[in-house]
Amino acid sequence: MSCIQVMNSFYSLMNSIERGTKMDDIKLTNRLLSVIENDILPLTMRGVDRGNKVFGAAILRKSDLSLVIAGTNDETSNPLWHGEVHTLKQFYELSERPDTKDLLFLTTHEPCTMCMSAITWAGFDNYFYFFSHEDSRDRFAIPHDLKIMKELYGLEPGGYHRKNAFFTSRSIPEMASLANEPERSDFENRIAEIKATYALASQTYQSHKGETGIPLD
């Protein structure tokens, strides 16, 4: 085989891998958005009526993206029951549960330092988030994640390593933006609808601020 043929075969293989990754990301993005829409958001809408924050999470199997469990914030019961930690609590209460190395962790908002650590200590090697830390501050008037990272660790927004020895984290909107048409436009429409629903949830949560006894409301 000539050098040119070898190089052509290499580029063909790389293009095939890239296409396969793109298709996997399309399938994964679609599923993550569906879980937010159909499994997390209904729980969160009920939770904010009780004065809880808008944060939710879910755990899925890597093998087929089926849902293991979904949860939402329950800080009115315990200020440690952030969306991610409360979902982990419920996961470990299951009579039978998969190994975390075989699972994906989905969180509606980029996790705080406590939740990041909990996900890590539970053995997950990943998490996917919809809203960023900056969104939590600017869209939801909940700046505590960024304040804690700055005060405790001196980190500016985005200053932690999203890919490290323990986990890789990915932004769902960024994944959606890399899709080809027509999937990208479909994702953008769904993302806009999800953001609009969370804006309504935030209004309900904000109306209860100061009434629930949550230390960092």
Image (cartoon, rainbow, N blue to C red):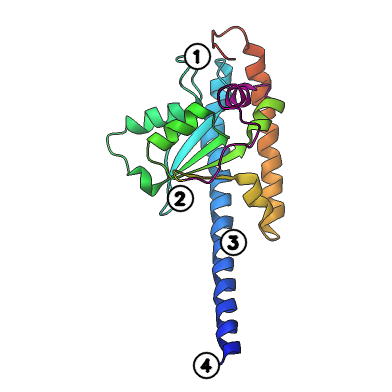
Marks 1,4: beta carbons within 8 A: no
Foreground tag (4 vs 3): 4
Element type at marker 2?
A: loop
Q: Position of residue 182 (x, y in %)?
A: 70, 59
* Mark 3 lies on residue: 22
Q: CA distance from mark 2 to mark 1?
A: 31 Å
Please state which amino acid type lies under the numbered disc 3. Lys
* Quadrant holding the C terminus: top right
- Cα distance, mark 2 to mark 3? 16 Å
Q: Is residue 45 above or below residue 27?
A: above
Q: Residue at x 68, y 26 (%)?
A: 137
The image shows residue 21 at horizontal and vertical percentages of 55, 62
Q: Which residues are magenta?
A: 139-164
Crowding near the residue tagged with mark 3, few <14, some 14–19, many ≥20 C-alpha atoms within 10 Å: some
Residue, disc 4: 1
In the rendered image, residue 188 lying in the magenta stretch gets the answer no
SS under mark 1: loop
- Magenta span contains residue 162: yes
Q: Position of residue 172 (x, y in %)?
A: 60, 45
> Seen in the image, is 33 located left or right of residue 114?
right
Seen from this angle, which residue lies furthest front? 154
The residue shown at (61%, 88%) is: 4
Front residue of 215 and 64: 215
The answer to whether marks 2 and 3 mark residues whose Cβ atoms lie closer than 8 Å is no
Corner quadrant of residue 49: top right
User: Which is nearer the N-term, disc 1 or disc 3?
Assistant: 3
Mark 4 lies on a secondary structure that is loop
